[in-house]
Image: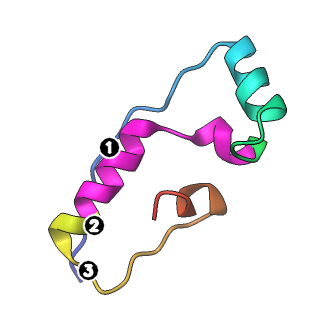
Amino acid sequence: MVGELEPVAAPSRNILTHAFCGYISATLPAIFWKNYSADMMLAVGDMVERTQYDIAIAEFSEMGMYL
């Protein structure tokens, strides 16, 4: 079994940004917006292209948005 780990810092948002984007904006459901990270999207995309794994597992739906 071969795997990779690439840590990405958690996003930080102030309460007004979180309230607007997570609850008022219809772009993403609140649970997804709370954990959304553009850096994570790039890291996962790069890893998927680079590694060419047959299977990728995303535990929890919040991580599924990156696949």
Asked if marks 2 and 1 touch (Cβ < 8 Å), the reply is no
Circle 1 residues within 10 Å: few <14, some 14–19, many ≥20: few
Labels 2 and 1: the sequence-earlier one:
1
Alpha carbon separation for disc pair 2 and 1: 15 Å
The residue under the point 74% across, 13% down is: 16
Which quadrant is the N terminus positioned in? bottom left
Asked if marks 3 and 1 touch (Cβ < 8 Å), the reply is no
Labels 3 and 1: the sequence-earlier one:
1
Is 1 drawn above or below residue 43 in the view shown? Answer: below
Disc 1 is placed on an element classified as loop
Q: Which residue in the protein does label 1 denote?
A: 7
Q: Amino acid at mark 1?
A: Pro
Q: Which circle, 2 or 1, is nearer the viewer?
A: 2
Residue 12: give x, y in percent of width and height: 54, 21
Asked if marks 2 and 3 touch (Cβ < 8 Å), the reply is yes
Q: Amino acid at mark 2?
A: Val
Residue sitting nearer the eye, 38 or 62: 38
Query: What residue range appears in magenta?
Result: 31-47
Is 1 drawn above or below residue 10 in the view shown? Answer: below
The residue under the point 37% across, 83% down is: 55
| Mark carried by residue 53 | 3
Residue 21: give x, y in percent of width and height: 71, 29
